[in-house]
Amino acid sequence: MRAPRTTAGVIAALLLVGIRLGRAFLAEAAIPAQTPDEAVTAATGTAPRSGWDDASSHGPIPVKAVVVSVYDGDTFTLETGDKIRLRWVNTPEMKPEEPWARDAKAFTDRFVRGQEVDLQVGSEGRDSYGRILAGVTTSEGSLSLALLEEGLGHLFLIPPDEIDLAPLYAAEERARAAGRGIWSHERFAGPLHITSFHGNGRGDDATNPNAESIRVCNISGKPLDLSQFRVRNEAGQVFPLGRMNVPPGYTVKIQSGRGTNQTDATRQQVTYLNQTTGIWNDEGDTVELLDASGRVVDWSKH
């Protein structure tokens, strides 16, 4: 009688093994395949680099390299893969397209693409997007100076800076006086120009209103008192700006929350709107920059 019992036991054991294998297969099939990034993290315990949002993740900064592509008048890419943000000048944006943006891009493309350029890198090294902040020169001279001379950009200075700015001021003034390029358009007729608008900042700007910011640049060619201007949102709310003297070509960062104004022009100037919650609609809004009479001197959307 043992043999039949043994045979039955073997069959039962095989059936049990088969059931367990089937369950394991189904469970494994239900788990999504790892992405390459997840595989790197699982194998090394470290997440891979994630684009341009961490400037510290990039390698050494070159002193010269060949330009392989041009995005707009002040942004282009090197053969090393590094992106350059040109120093001392701000050109019209391609997205959304501003007046003279295509002309500035075409000028920069002719000036640098396919050429080995020398880089004058400042103390900052890279910006928060990972781009190298650098002046650029070729055998034809300084790209920043050439753009200013043609009226295809305005001075854009973020201290500290160690160079002689006089030639840049002079080039911009000649272009403004001649009405070349941007100086022929109403968007650049006012004393201040909005160069960036982050109405939906990182994180919860309802509880951290300083995640919202605007950057404005003094394009008047002379010092300005910022308290003579205000900003307005689409809801019609108007917010005064702090008192500070802004030198020509310098920028001010305007943050929605609370803080102590940074008025020293040897560092990045900052003013706060002193709000306890965000003031810009995350789904889309318009900022208008008003002078003391209530006239709109510039505007921007996000």
Image (tube, rainbow, N blue to C red):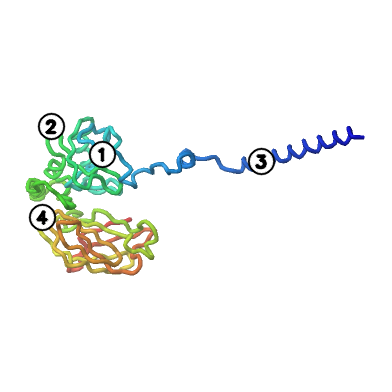
**What's the amino acid at mark 2?**
Ser
Q: Nearer the viewer, mark 4 or mark 1?
A: 1
Residue position for label 2: 139
Q: Which residue: 23% across, 30% down? A: 114
Distance from disc 4 to disc 2, alpha carbons, whole Å, reads 29 Å
| Circle on res. 24 | 3
Q: Quadrant of the N terminus?
A: top right
Disc 1, SS: strand
Distance from disc 1 to disc 2, alpha carbons, whole Å, reads 18 Å
- Image coords of residue 91 (percent x, y): 21, 46
**What's the amino acid at mark 1?**
Phe
Q: Are marks 4 and 1 in contact (CB under 8 Å)?
A: no
- Mark 4 or mark 2: name the one nearer the start of the chain: 2
Q: Is 84 placed above or below 218 here?
A: above
- Image coords of residue 277 (percent x, y): 35, 67
Mark 3: give few (<14), some (14-19) or many (20+) Cα within 10 Å. Answer: few
**What's the amino acid at mark 4?**
Gly
Q: Between residues 166 and 153, which one lies in front from this camera angle?
A: 166
Q: Between residues 72 and 131, which one lies in front from this camera angle?
A: 131
**What's the amino acid at mark 3?**
Ala
Q: Which residue: 62% across, 41% down? A: 28
| Circle on res. 76 | 1
Q: Between residues 69 and 203, which one lies in front from this camera angle?
A: 203
Q: Are marks 4 and 3 in contact (CB under 8 Å)?
A: no
Q: Nearer the viewer, mark 4 or mark 3?
A: 3
| Circle on res. 221 | 4
